Amino acid sequence: MNTREDKFSKAMVATPPSGIRKFFEMLIGHDDVISLSVGEPDFPTPWVVREEAFYHLEKGHTSYTSNWGLLELREEIARYMEKYGTFYNPKNEILVTVGASEGVDAVLRAVLNEGDELIVCEPCYVNYVPLALLTGAKIVKLDTSVNGFYPTAEQFEKLITPKTKAVMFCSPSNPTGTMIPPSELKKIAELCVKNQIWAIADEIYCELVYEDNNHVSIGSFPNMKDYTIILNGFSKSFAMTGWRIGWIAAPEDLMAQIVKLHQYNTICAPIFSQYAAAEGLRHGWKDVEKMRVSYQQRRNLMYKAFSDMGLDVPEPTGAFYMFPSIKGFGMTSEEFATRLFQKHNVAVVPGSAFGEAGEGHIRCCYATGIDKMKIALDRIFEFVEEARKNAKTK
């Protein structure tokens, strides 16, 4: 006898809901909870960006754009990308998307066939694996936790087979805040060229780096343009999460395939968001820098707090996440996060939401006001002390 579930897509039924959104939904109706869970800047979008949107709305610019996006925005993106030694034709190698998340979906569906292998560096952002599985591809997981939370060329090389179609990573990383060292990135690039496989590089946090660290794009290495797909957007660096504006940069022949899916499932990104994003690239960099400096100060505060708690935690060199270990407390990461929420009104994301390699950790976002963050860290300290005592008595 058929069940109601038989009427649904088997692939979708097998797809788990986002582990991040689960904890986000828990916050609804709890005004006394301090959230370190969702990766969203607490800054408003820079005024110069908002003002540009107001102008175009007042002018009645509310139509569709080209499927590719406004040419003026694509030209600004192309100029911006030259900063990192990557060169793309704005007419046919840059596509404006409805956030970088749409870009992930479009890229994976344009590249992967059933049975292809995709090497994913875990822990990783929550949408990579589910969206790849919907294509029928096989996920090959690379565990970065054994190497300071960044992948090495040696690790990739051991996993590459004749069925490998692409490797996928985020640097700076969500959820760990770590970056792939340039010397290692160069070796990974050489490996991709040698094996003629795609490097899908999520660079959404590339403007949020600290101290003497500088973002390096894998697409800047010799012969890599033909094998590189870059995902980026405005949500994090420009505090434009709700504007839903991102982009894909890839070779012309692949982009001709990607744009077909974009035509059918979204048509184009919102026009006022596109005008605003273009103005951000022209005149919004002072605001970006102010936010980056603030995140660095918050990172320092959170890193010291977790270190003082005696938790093993890699010091982030980019993004705005910290990934402390909670091993030794006799709890899974989900149990830890749930009890912390229930007992101390602090929301964090369990590391297991980012793959098996994330188990034993929690992700804490420091794009939160310092006053609230201090209170949250005090509460986490209390919970850690309780958990440590309980673990010793068992």
Image (cartoon, helix red, strand yellow):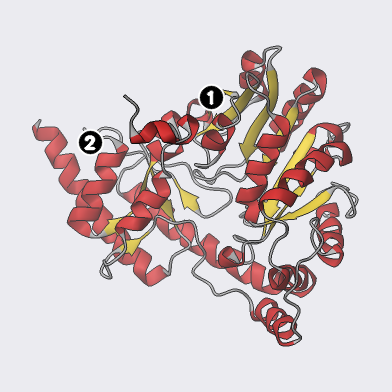
Is 286 above or below relative to 244?
below
Q: Give the residue number, with chain letter if any, for mark 1.
A: 141
Q: Nearer the viewer, residue 296 or 131?
A: 131
Residue positioned 87% across, 37% down in the render: 253
> In what element is the residue under mark 1?
strand
Residue type pointed to by label 1:
Lys
Where does the image place residue 328, in percent across and percent down from the top left?
A: 25, 32
Q: Local crowd at mark 2 within 10 Å, few (<14), some, or many (≥20)?
A: some
Where does the image place residue 135, in percent across and percent down from the top left?
A: 61, 30
Q: Quadrant of the N terminus?
A: top left
Judge whether residue 104 can be spotted in this image.
Answer: yes
Residue positioned 65% across, 79% down in the render: 50
> In what element is the residue under mark 2?
loop
Q: Which mark, by number, is residue 272?
A: none
Where does the image place residue 14, in percent across and percent down from the top left?
A: 43, 31
The CA span between labels 1 and 2 is 26 Å
Q: Local crowd at mark 1 within 10 Å, few (<14), some, or many (≥20)?
A: many
Residue type pointed to by label 2:
Phe
Where does the image place residue 34, in percent across and percent down from the top left?
A: 32, 64
Image quadrant where residue 362 sits: top left
Is 390 above or below relative to 295?
above
Residue positioned 67% across, 28% down in the render: 167
Q: Which mark, by number, is residue 329?
A: 2
In front: mark 1 or mark 2? 1
* 115 left or right, relative to 370: right
Q: Nearer the viewer, residue 24 or 335?
A: 24
